[in-house]
Image (spheres, rainbow, N blue to C red):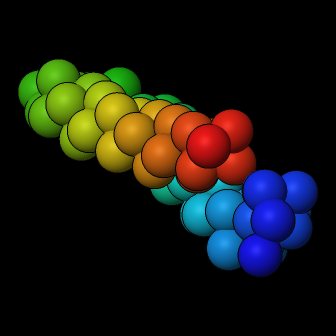
Amino acid sequence: MNKTEEANDERHYILIVIAIVIILFGVFFRFLAPENTTHVSMYNWVSNIFFVLGIGIALKGVFAILK
């Protein structure tokens, strides 16, 4: 398999779409916290974890395409 076919492999793009879904879940989770609760920072921590996880997966997919 040459490099063009390997870069166009759909596995990489599926991985990027999964990463985008994880990041969007993090955005949704950040705004899910009720305003009158004391656990707002917990929601922020969890959403930041989803952000970092999603960004890591997306970068893995992008670097696999560029390789």
Seen at 77% across and 75% down, the residue is 1
Count of numbered marks: 0
Q: In this view, does 48 lie above or below 12?
A: above
Residue at the outermost front position: 2
Horizontal relation, residue 56 to residue 16: left or right: left
Q: In which quarter of the image is residue 53?
A: top left
Q: In which quarter of the image is residue 58?
A: top right
Tell which of 64 and 28 is nearer to you: 64
Tell which of 48 and 40 is nearer to you: 48
Horizontal relation, residue 19 to residue 33: left or right: right
Asked if residue 23 can be seen in this view, the reply is: no
Q: In this view, does 42 lie above or below 14?
A: above
Horizontal relation, residue 1 to residue 60: left or right: right
Tell which of 1 and 61 is nearer to you: 1
Residue 66 picture location, percent across and down:
68, 39
Q: Is residue 16 above or below residue 24?
A: below
Q: Quadrant of residue 26?
A: top left
Residue 49 picture location, percent across and down:
26, 38
Q: In which quarter of the image is the C terminus?
A: top right
Asked if residue 10 can be seen in this view, the reply is: yes
Tell which of 35 and 45 is nearer to you: 45
Seen at 60% across and 63% down, the residue is 15
Residue 52 picture location, percent across and down:
34, 34
